[in-house]
Structures are given as structure tokens and as C-alpha cells.
Amino acid sequence: MDNITVRQGETVFLRCAQGDVVTHTAWLNRSSILYAGEDKWSVDPRVSLVTLNQEEFTIKIENVDMTDEGQYVCAVQTSSRPRTTSVHILVQVPPKIINLSRDFVVNEGSNVTLMCQAGGKPEPSISWKLISSSAHLASDDEYLEIPSISRQKAGTYECTAVNDIDTDVQTVDITVNYVPSVSEGRDVGVTLGQRGVLECEADAVPAADFEWYKEDRRIFNGFDGMEIMNTGSLSKLTFFNVSDGDYGNYTCVALNTLGSSNTSFLLFVVIEPTSSTLLQGPRAVQDGSGGAMGVHLHTCLLFIVFLPFLLRF
């Protein structure tokens, strides 16, 4: 018995040798007659006659499926005795992922199990890998276990099913929620009357909301000439005309459904040098005796100027 290997969806030809002494011939499948000579007994439209003459009797089956796999028999009747020829059709099926975990959202620290099941013939092998993160995570099983998942393991997971015929790939997205963490606040010095900005950046999923406080008092947008602008993970507190009352300690709070985090800032005064200070330069002396020192210096200069005249007398 011969084997014919064919891929799902292709066409297979079944050939049977004839001879001058053949009186009757037929193709059968599992005891069901497909063709008896030129007469089609099968109701399957995919089965058709190709050749029937003294040399060969050939039929074809189009768009082969798994249901077509099995043994086929060509029965030939001659004047002396009957004979049969058998052939076994093996259908190969490319892999297809049929059961895959859906995209989902979990909190950091949760245990996660991903499932990927596939059909095909030969039976496909399954592998997992994380493709959208720097974290290395892989598995050669239809189940991928991720204990106590961290934010670094969030991203797109790729399931690959492979056999000798082809490859099927599908993906699952995992979103990991976690408590906000804020960058350390940087103190800012601003000259009186000038513009100043405090910046607060937070890493969080879901995205953080921001609150600003001066000491224990919450600041709202437009309060005392301040503006709060939030863009993604960044919040800015802007002072358009810094006054004496603006200087001091500020706190930025980032919060989401899982918790909150905060950082502190100091807005301090920067004294702008005056024109008189620039003229005096580094030798200028500012203390209580400054006036007396000036009079004494003036007197010494006058004495030096008039000394030659006094010596002439």
C-alpha cells in the first residue's frame, strides 16, 4: 500500500493501472463507492473523474480536508480474477492557534497564567516570548506562568505554533497597574517679579493625577496667579510674577487608584545685583564706619596735594 501525503486545501490525484482484460473498475473509500467506471456514485462535488481508458483510471479530490484522510481502494475486475490496489492519503494541516488568552489588565504582584492552544498535523509545538520589553521571558509550553508580575513584565506576549507545514503567530497584551513613583523634586531659585516653574514627573499605570500644596494648603489652578498644567506624566506649577509670598516649600502629590507618592520643592529668592553694587566692585566696603573712612581718606589726599606749598615757607 502506497502513502500519499498532501497538504490541507490542495488537490490529490488517485491513479489505478488498467489493462485490456479489465471489464469493470471502481474507486472506493471506506467501503463507499466514489466512482464505478464512468458513473459517479459520490455526492461530494470535490470528487471528479480525470481519466478512464485502457491504461489508467484516475480520479481527483480537490480542496482536501482532514475528513479525506484514510485508505482508498481501486477494485479491478478482469476475465480471470479481481484485483485491488490500495493507497493511503495522509493530510497535513498547518498550525492554527484556536484558544488564546485575551488581553487583560492586572495589578503589580498578581500571578498570571497565559494559555495558547493550537491544532494542526503534525501536532505543532508552542512557544512564548515577551517582545515589547527589555525583560527576557520565554517558554516552550502552551501555558506561560508569570508569578508576582512586575511592571517590567508588562507588554506584548507572542505565542508561536510551528509544525513541518507552517507557522501561526498571535499576541496577547498585558497591562500592569502600579502605584505612582515621582522623581525627586529640584529646588528652584527665582528673582522677585520674574517667572518661575516647578516640575513634577510621575511614573504610574493608570496615569497619575496631580495635586500641588504649599505647606498644608492645596493649590488650585489660577490660585494667586499660579497655573497648573498637566501633560501625560508631567505636571508644571508656574508662577508668572513671583512675589515675596510665593517663596517657600511646595509638595507635589501623584495619585491613582492604587496609591500615591509625593516629592517636595523649595522656591527660594535670588537677589539680582544692582547698578551701584556693580560700580563699587569687589573693593567696596559696606559697614558702619564707611562714612568716617571716606572723610579720613579725603583729608589725607588734601594734605598730600598742599605739602609742597607748605615746605616753601
Image (spheres, grey):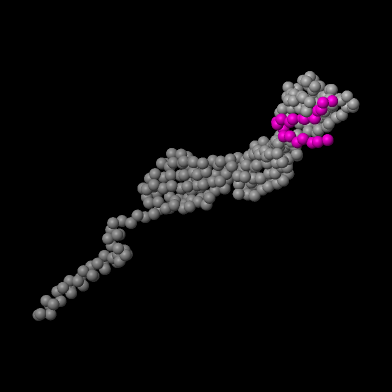
Give 294 or 168, whichever is nearer the viewer.
168
Residue pictured at 10% horizontal, 80% vertical: 312
Q: Is residue 291 visible?
A: yes
Q: Which of the 4 image quarters holds residue 254?
A: top right
The image position of residue 174, as x and y in percent, is 64, 41
Residue pictured at 81% horizontal, 33% vertical: 87
Residue pictured at 51% horizontal, 41% vertical: 232
Extreme residue toward the right, this view: 80
Residue pictured at 50% horizontal, 51% vertical: 185
Identify the magenta region: 1-21
The image position of residue 89, as x and y in percent, is 78, 33
Q: Which of the 4 image quarters holds residue 291?
A: bottom left
Give 217 or 6, whichever is nearer the viewer.
6
Report whether 67 appears left or right of 218: right
- Give the quadrant of the C terminus: bottom left
Extreme residue toward the front, this view: 20
Q: Is residue 37 magenta?
A: no
Q: Is residue 15 magenta?
A: yes
Report whether 252 appears left or right of 19: left
- Give the quadrant of the N terminus: top right
Q: Examine the rendered structure and indicate whether residue 299 appears above or below residue 210.
A: below
The image position of residue 240, as x and y in percent, is 39, 44
The image position of residue 25, as x and y in percent, is 82, 24
Q: Is residue 172 visible?
A: no
Give 62 or 133, whichever is nearer the viewer.
62
